[in-house]
Image (tube, rainbow, N blue to C red):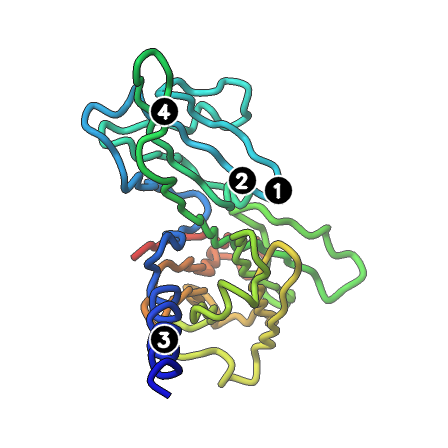
Amino acid sequence: MADKCDLCVLGLIILSSLLTGISGADDHVFISSGENVRLSCNNALSDCKSKTTWNYNRHSATVELINKGIKNKDTERHERLSLESDCSLNIKNVTEEDYGSYTCQQWINVTGKDQQQGSDARVSLHVLHVSVSPSSSSSSSSSSSSSSQTEISPGRSVTLSCQLYSYTGFSCDDRVSSEGVELLWVNQTGVDLKTDSRYQILSSSDQYRCFIITLTTTLLNEDNNREWRCQLTHRNQLKTSVRYTVKYSAQADSTTAVNPVHITH
């Protein structure tokens, strides 16, 4: 009986370690597209820049971004990457294509041979991205657009799609969803827009976007300066958000600019 209890306690310790991010679990970083992000290398050595390698993995394809302090110029985003003195990896102007698993390794020379020092430091980068798809209620509507500044006008229907791009080597349900990640569309006072009948809120997911939440509504004249915000919480803590504000010009029939503002906590 005592042996069984010991096994139960051991099982609880292992489970607790996995849930709290110990025992080599990934460090999760949440960021909005368009922002800059810094990924830490937790096992950094002193004077580590010449000893650091950063690898990137997504969908079982591994790309070497930095090899012992030297950037790989064959990658499309090498100009947006930089290595800090503490060996953290900086990524400028993050896009939804940057999501994935990043691994930091430290290498030292021992008797003429390179040898890895310590274990891999893994960081899972999750990117929050919002696209806008305006459409007219008439048959002469313009084509949809996902640009950051979109021309729309009162009377048209607009859809804001808030998407979280995630990859950890496991399914979304196995890792990200189980860790308490939530997306919400709220108004400027923080009230969940699901409570307002004029907004249609739909949630879904696919293979690479663990969370997709869309907001659809028909713009009214009084929507001038109206603010909607997609916010991401992780374990009940606000991590990042994207705010959209509708601004009408003086003429009622003129176009409307919808501009995103990214807020990372």
Q: Is residue 30 visible?
A: no
Amino acid carrying label 1: it is Ser
Q: Nearer the viewer, mark 4 or mark 2?
A: 4
Numbered badge on residue 60: 1
Amino acid carrying label 2: it is Asn
Please tell me which residue lies in front, 193 or 217. 193
**Mark 4 lies on residue:** 115
Mark 2 touching mark 1, by CB under 8 A?
yes
Q: Is residue 199 above or below residue 27?
A: below
* SS at mark 3 in the image: helix
* SS at mark 1 in the image: loop
**Mark 3 lies on residue:** 12
Please tell me which residue lies in front, 164 or 225. 164
Q: CA distance from mark 4 to mark 1?
A: 25 Å
Q: CA distance from mark 4 to mark 2?
A: 22 Å
Side of 14 where 42 appears, left or right: left
**Mark 2 lies on residue:** 57
Instruction: Give x and y (percent) for residue 103.
Output: 42, 39
Instruction: Give x and y (percent) for residue 173.
Output: 57, 67
Amino acid carrying label 3: it is Leu
Mark 4 touching mark 2, by CB under 8 A?
no
Furthest toward the right, the residue is: 139
